[in-house]
């Protein structure tokens, strides 16, 4: 059974202890040293033992700690007391890992101190943790969990907005170099990644890989928002049937298509004219042709469904 020591004082320490008591492991034995008796709960599991004394006393502290304790967590309000306690542990227990709660603005001396070079020492900055919580709620900012792993951004959550080039794509169709889409969150459930899984808008992707590559992927997911027709294609098609539509309806559709083509990220606008019957409109439509606008007339009497199927086959070819 692993022995873990908690040396606690203050409101943060109390909240930490409450969480441990709710999520403790039966495979650990917990030695808890507090300065204030109010931190000791009325009821606690048998794997916990509580002591109430001033932990800056090396004589008393060494009575409860020994070489079997693998980890010590120090959450102390007073920075000077915390440094004294850490020095006692560092002097007598070289192999013990120590986790310290610090406040950067008031404890810069600790970071510059030689004890900070101790490989067994882990510093947790309370202000940085709080700032990261706020940052994670900001829109358009990559969410990188720092509570596990290397904490360097090698794991990232990316929410997929409407209009993203990743939306409505199979995960297997996305080239993943130096990173992987591990899975995604959808409707309060986690789905493991498969080649056939289709990414939907509002999904949250869980990706892992090179931190620099992940930042590029984040901007790629977000960069093409609102740039229709992506991800459905790259061109806009307009179908006009002179036999079924009035002249007013045809010109309305043409002007709307021209407006969309101009303001959206459309590679090309195709105007397909079915059943051309008016020479006047024939020349009017031809005058619209440019490098990015192509006008085609169908003189073979094909229906809209037949023409749509024919164009679809050409695009796939």
Image (spheres, rainbow, N blue to C red):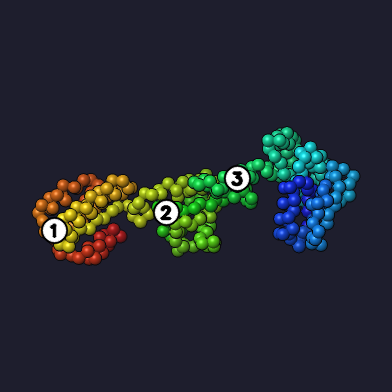
Q: Which mark is on residue 162?
A: 2
Answer whether labels 1 and 3 touch (C-beta < 8 Å). no
Q: Earlier in the sequence, mark 1 or mark 2?
A: 2
Q: Quadrant for the N terminus, please.
A: bottom right
Crowd band around label 1 with a 10 angstrom C-alpha radius: few (<14), some (14–19), many (20+): some
Q: Relative to residue 107, is residue 201 depicted above or below?
A: below
Residue 66 visible (yes or no): no
Of 249 and 301, nearer the camera is 249
Q: Earlier in the sequence, mark 3 or mark 2?
A: 3
- The picture quadrant where one finds residue 175 is bottom left
Answer whether labels 3 and 2 touch (C-beta < 8 Å). no
Residue at 29% over, 52% down: 235
Q: Which mark is on residue 276?
A: 1
- The x, y position of residue 238, in whole percent, is 24, 56
**SS type, badge 2:** loop
Q: Is residue 84 left or right of residue 316?
A: right
**SS type, badge 1:** loop
Q: According to the image, label 3 marks what residue?
A: 132
- The picture quadrant where one finds residue 50 is bottom right
Of 118 and 279, nearer the camera is 279
Q: Distance from label 1 to label 2 (Cα)?
A: 38 Å
Residue at 90% over, 44% down: 59
- The x, y position of residue 20, in whole percent, is 73, 56
Crowd band around label 2 with a 10 angstrom C-alpha radius: few (<14), some (14–19), many (20+): many
Residue at 63% over, 51% down: 148
């Amino acid at each position: 059974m692993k022995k873990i020591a908690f040396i606690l004082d203050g409101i943060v320490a109390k909240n930490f202890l409450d969480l441990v008591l709710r999520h403790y492991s039966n495979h650990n034995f917990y030695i808890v040293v507090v300065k204030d008796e109010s931190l000791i709960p009325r009821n606690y599991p048998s794997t916990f033992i509580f002591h109430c004394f001033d932990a800056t006393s090396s004589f008393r502290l060494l009575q409860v700690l020994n070489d079997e304790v693998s980890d010590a967590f120090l959450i102390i309000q007073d920075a000077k007391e915390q440094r004294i306690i850490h020095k006692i542990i560092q002097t007598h227990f070289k192999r013990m890992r120590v986790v310290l709660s610090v406040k950067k603005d008031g404890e810069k001396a600790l970071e510059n101190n030689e004890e900070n070079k101790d490989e067994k020492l882990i510093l947790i900055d309370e202000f940085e943790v709080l700032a990261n919580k706020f940052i994670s709620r900001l829109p358009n900012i990559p969410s990188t969990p720092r509570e596990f792993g290397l904490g360097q951004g090698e794991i990232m959550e990316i929410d997929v907005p409407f209009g993203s080039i990743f939306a409505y794509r199979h995960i297997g169709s996305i080239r993943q170099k130096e990173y992987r889409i591990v899975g995604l969150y959808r409707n309060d459930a986690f789905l493991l990644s498969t080649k056939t899984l289709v990414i939907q808008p509002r999904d949250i992707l869980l990706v892992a890989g090179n931190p620099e590559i992940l930042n590029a992927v984040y901007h790629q997911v977000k960069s093409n928002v609102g740039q229709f027709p992506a991800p459905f294609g790259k061109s806009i098609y307009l179908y006009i049937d002179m036999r079924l539509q009035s002249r007013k309806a045809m010109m309305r559709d043409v002007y709307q298509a021209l407006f969309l083509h101009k303001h959206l990220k459309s590679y090309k606008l195709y105007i397909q004219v079915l059943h051309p019957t008016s020479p006047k409109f024939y020349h009017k439509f031809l005058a619209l042709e440019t490098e990015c606008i192509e006008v085609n007339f169908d003189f073979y009497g094909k229906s809209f469904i037949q023409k749509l199927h024919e164009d679809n086959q050409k695009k796939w070819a």
